[in-house]
Amino acid sequence: MLLVACKVTLTSIDERTTDRMTTGQTLALGAVAGFTIFLGLPLGRVRSADVRLQAGLSALACGVLLFLLWDVLVHGVAPVEEALEGAVEGEGSWGEFFGYAALLAGGLIAGLMSLVYYDRWMKQRRSSTLVGPGAAAIDEFASRPWIERLSTGRQLALLIAVGIGLHNFGEGLAIGQAGAAGEISLALALIIGFGLHNATEGFGIVGPMSGESERPSWAFLGLLGLIGGGPTFLGTVVGSAWVNEAMSIAFFAVAAGSILYVIQELMNVNRKFGLPVLVTWMLLLGLFLGFATDFVLEAAEHAG
């Protein structure tokens, strides 16, 4: 359906312009690519007493995130390698290479260690004893920030959405840049591929909540979708007007660090299920789903 809709839109674009997509058309298609993340979010309300289903969903989410980590690192490292090749061949400067390399390393550290320290701070807050008796203790708990009152699974889902959102901002930059440059076929290919990516990312976001007895509200799932998918549209807006290589590296690096942290946490959760065979197969399935959507993107780009 996404492919058909994009082809219809592309046909109307080609009828009106031969060298450039309008800003409105580019933004509309960027919004479509980001919206597909909502397709996988309703799975977060599925509840089952079967621990195998819970383990399968959690492992599937971990597999999707493993692919995203690879995908983000490839996009973040590529400009650094190009700068290195340019410096070695005398066509670029060593200063640019070292600057990009420092930006990549700094982004990775910021994305990963900020969540490590935040998680430690949250655990210390949870372990602190409520001082008031009875109603006073309840009032003290209610006065805490809403994120501290979320369950562990919901907090992890929120962190996944943030990491994916940073990744999707970079994807939006690519869509906006292609549209602004008049590369209509490339823009369409990116929208199709990223749209499929985002559909699988919805599974990755809700995976940590599969083992909880209480269903997440539709409002909370909507918030996760906006955090994870909304940056695709925002990146398209920025990319249509202005693109900077250093900014792209920074966003991809921070996204890689945050996704790496979440994978580390999910691996720990998956081990606790005690179903290593099922978990491993579902992890591979999630990884294969990620690569399958990437192959669709590559095929569409070359066909265009």
Image (spheres, grey):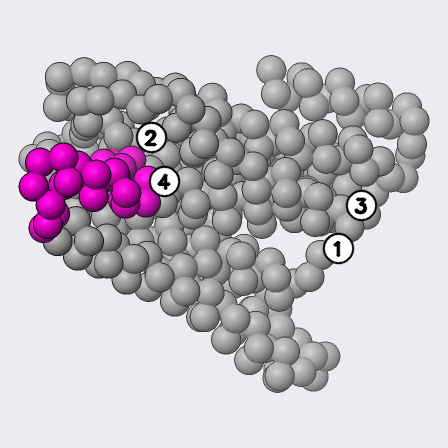
Q: Residues within 10 Å of mark 2 (few under 14, many from 20)?
A: many
Say which of 101 and 24 sits in front.
24
Residue 209 image offset from top left, x and y in percent: 26, 30
Residue at 52% of width from left, 71% of height from top? 103
Sequence-first disc among 2 and 3: 3
Q: Residues within 10 Å of mark 3 (few under 14, many from 20)?
A: many
Q: What span is colored magenta in the figure? A: 129-156
Which residue in the protein does label 1 denote? 242
In front: label 4 or label 2: 4
Amino acid type of the residue tagged 2 in the rendering: Val
Q: The C terminus lies in which quarter of the figure?
A: top right
Amino acid type of the residue tagged 3 in the rendering: Ala
Magenta stretch prevailing secondary structure: helix
Placement of 174 over or under 53, stated as above or below: below
Gap in angstroms between the C-alphas marked 2 and 1:
33 Å
Secondary-structure class at tag 3: helix
Which residue in the protein does label 4 denote? 158
Disc ID at residue 180: 3
Residue 55 image offset from top left, x and y in percent: 18, 29
Which residue in the protein does label 2 denote? 206
